[in-house]
Image (cartoon, rainbow, N blue to C red):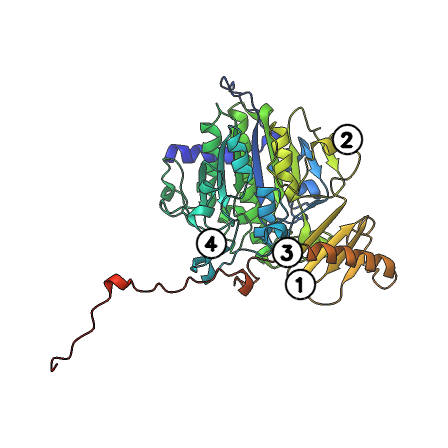
Amino acid sequence: MLPLRRGILAAAALLLPDTVIAQVPAAPGAERPNALVIVLDRVGTGDVGFLGSTLGATPNLDALAARGAVLQRAYAASPQSSPARAAIFTGRWPNAMGFEFAMPMGEEANAPDAAARGLLPGTPTIGSQLAAGGWTTGFVGSWQMGVTAEQAPMSMGFGFDCFVAHATRTRKPRPGKDDGFSLRSLGAVNEDFERLEDAMTACATGFIERERSKPWLLVAALPGLSPPLSPASEDLAAFPQLEGRRREMAASLRALDRSIGAMLAAIETTGQTARTMVVVIGDTGGSAAWGSSNGTLHGDFGTCFEGGLRVPMVMSLPGRITPGSTYPHPVTGADVLPTVAAALGQAPPTPIDGVDLLPFLAGASPGLPHAELHWRAGQSAATMFSGLKYVVPLDGAPSIYRIDQDPTESVNGAEDSVDAYTMLRDRHERWSQALPPARWLQDGTIPEAQRTPAPPPALPDPGKRRAPKTDPEQ
């Protein structure tokens, strides 16, 4: 294990654009393409170099962006992490599945009705869809889709997993167990690693190297900027100009980028670059409270303003996506599954809400991928249509913006454009009223109407009743 560890950490230090790596011929029968989907955890648009940050924490992501397309207006499907990831994994609007709120992180996670939260067992995922088509599938990272064995990655279409349950906040690896929610890998002794991120990186790169002779899908959702942050001292030392949580965020992002660099290096050293699609997408906007930056965008993690919804996104596919290109129109996390499926020659599952973005990136589809987009997480909500955006904040009155001209949401036109305000509000209400109810609430409780009624107590078997006692005096 230790030689593997040293190899992985050495690979993670590589900065791909400046490194020449020997190519290993692909094994026979491996012509079908692979896909690596990387989900960034609360990384803001102001944190990454390919969207203008001068922080210098993301050299590997920036190099990948130069080899692919940057989607400049990528939106999370929810301002909350778990529903946003559900859209990435399923291609569905989370609200359409009753997945409106984040998975609870407290006692509710271990409650008797825990299975009522998260993805319903049997929900089609990007893993199950590609596994059915013959791909070897793997998941590494933070799941957040449910806490029962029937909701674990291995039960939802991923043939390999190495992850930590969504409710686990520790940054230290745990010994492997077969309970469906422990950090583990095939044959790896994860206790040898001092940091969770290093163990997960080894899981990811080991999967890529091990499956080089087969077509594969790997979804990597490492807990990069999920609090609490505990960056290594060597990463903190790289940002002496920063202080407090901003410095901790930059150091944590540097470590996350290094893990991504190790995955990309593993693809390249095993000769799989030409046939591997790579998608990187954030789950939500960054959290200023934990040191992230959303650049000039208004709003923060958890809100439906641009800062809470706009996320970094890159797609790379040699021969299909033009290196160094950009795409300026709104796309969303639900588009990942149908786009990856199309790139790999597979049909998406049905129903599906996202769209295949490849024709739009190639200029073959001149229209917009989405005529309108909607969001709702309790009181926080928004609708975007025809260059306008309607926002319902957590507190205060709704507002509207000419979002195509005012991406910083600095001019509220609610009073000056009454007709536009009414039109957007009505569109949002029609969409909202057509949704199924949320299957659990913000605090994790199950609504009364959604609860499964407890079965009535069983009546005693008449054949097993005791005979009545007789009076001894009779």
Q: Residue under label 4, please give it.
A: 115
Residue 341 position within the rendered picture, expressed as x and y whole percent measured from the top left: 61, 32
Q: Residues within 10 Å of mark 1 (few under 14, many from 20)?
A: few
Q: Residue furthest front?
A: 474
The earlier-in-sequence mark between 3 and 1 is 3
Q: Cβ–Cβ below 8 Å for labels 2 and 1?
A: no
Pick whichever, 283 or 109, lies toward us: 109
Alpha carbon distance from label 1 to label 4: 25 Å
The earlier-in-sequence mark between 3 and 2 is 3
**Residue 243 seen in this snapshot:** no
Relative vertical location of residue 221 with respect to residue 168 in this rendering, above or below:
above
Tell me the kind of residue under disc 3: Phe
Residue 462 position within the rendered picture, expressed as x and y whole percent measured from the top left: 28, 64
Point 57% across, 32% down: residue: 35
Point 58% across, 47% down: residue: 85
Tell me the kind of residue under disc 1: Gln
Q: Residues within 10 Å of mark 2 (few under 14, many from 20)?
A: few
The earlier-in-sequence mark between 1 and 4 is 4
Mark whose residue sits in front, 3 or 2? 2
Q: Quadrant of the C terminus?
A: bottom left
The earlier-in-sequence mark between 2 and 1 is 2
Q: Residue under label 1, please give it.
A: 379
Q: Element type at marker 3?
A: loop
Residue 380 position within the rendered picture, expressed as x and y whole percent measured from the top left: 67, 60
Q: Residue under label 3, please give it.
A: 301
Q: Cβ–Cβ below 8 Å for labels 4 and 3?
A: no
